[in-house]
Amino acid sequence: MTALLPLLRRRCSGGHTAGALLARAARGRSARRGFRAHGQRSAALRLDSGACGLPHPQKRATGGEDAWFICDNTVGVADGVGGWARKGIDSGEYSRTLMASAEHMVTVATERPTPLQVLTEAHQNAQCLGSSTACIVQLDDAMLRAINLGDSGFLLCRLHPDEDARGARKWQIVHETLHQCHYFNCPYQLGYGANGDTPEMGEVYELKAQEGDVIVLGTDGLFDNLYSEQIASLLDTVLPSTQEEHNQLSMDKIASCIAHTAHEVAKGTKTKTPFAVAAQQAGYEYLGGKMDDITVVTSLVTGDWAQK
């Protein structure tokens, strides 16, 4: 992602605010870019989640500009807007701070906050220069709640109830988010200061989940290179069709498979990708993938409380 909103110009304050402290914590964890925490709450259903982050090859030294967290049936991804690098700003610092703040709120809350509440507080606490897209998904028993702002997003996938001619059940997309963009390659984005987009501008979702559902959460590095149907087809390849076999899986490995597939497509120059189609519709001559940071979080909705 390269384009940033021109009005996001306000500099960081010098006070020792909660946001500043979280920024320091995020810088210390920047090599991971991801945050995991284990809450104490219980529910009839839970998320078994894993993640994979692949920085742009030219950004490996800094860990890239994406960030993610997994915490207490809540997962999130953020994609720092790369245009800040032209101003000498670490484009990943804001996304890392945003996700660290979101993880912190979920961890310390005495009552489960909604994704909008999480994103709103994270936005308030992320007091460093930069901007980022964000997507946060939460499972509360069988209710899936989410907020998405920008061109990250998620898919809710479910096995089709009927078998095909070979006796296999295929994964189908029950729901997918829509991208929010001001114009081509300039998504809605949160940033520090009074200008720019706000969490309330994000799309809020409430969906019924079922045991065995799989949620695929990703930044634009995923969705710019793979169509939703291709991601569902990957699930057909790497995921078994029974709940019992699901429980033997590593969701980290599923996320890794999807992320590396997107990375391979990003290297191509002749593929008709979602990004290429969008570029052509915007009047650009473009074909092939788009090399970028790629972050994928996969979550299995399960009632099995055995920790892996």
Image (cartoon, grey):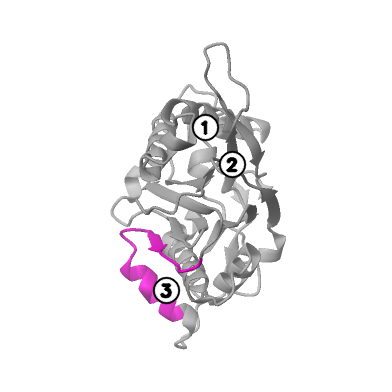
Q: Where is residue 226 in the image (x, y as percent from the top left)?
A: 52, 32
The residue carrying pointer 2 sits among few (fewer than 14), some (14 to 19) or many (20 or more) residues within 10 Å by Cα, namely many
**Which is more foreground, mark 1 or mark 3?**
1
Q: Which mark is residue 231?
A: 1
Residue 34 is inside the magenta segment? yes
Dot placed on the residue nearer the N-terminal end, 1 or 3: 3
Alpha carbon distance from label 1 to label 2: 9 Å
Magenta segment? 20-41
Q: Residue 155 carries which label?
A: 2
Amino acid type at mark 2: Leu
The residue carrying pointer 1 sits among few (fewer than 14), some (14 to 19) or many (20 or more) residues within 10 Å by Cα, namely many
Q: Where is residue 76 in the image (x, y as percent from the top left)?
A: 51, 57
Amino acid type at mark 3: Ala
Residue 161, by quadrant, is top right
Query: Secondary structure beneath disc 2?
Result: strand
Which residue is rendered at x = 48% and y = 85% of the image? 17
The residue carrying pointer 3 sits among few (fewer than 14), some (14 to 19) or many (20 or more) residues within 10 Å by Cα, namely many
Tags 2 and 3 in contact by the CB under 8 Å rule? no
Q: Where is residue 251 in the image (x, y as percent from the top left)?
A: 40, 44
Residue 112 versus residue 251 in the image, above or below: below
Which residue was labeled with disc 3?
23
Instruction: Name the residue furthest bottom.
Output: 15
Dot placed on the residue nearer the N-terminal end, 2 or 3: 3
Q: Which mark is residue 100?
A: none
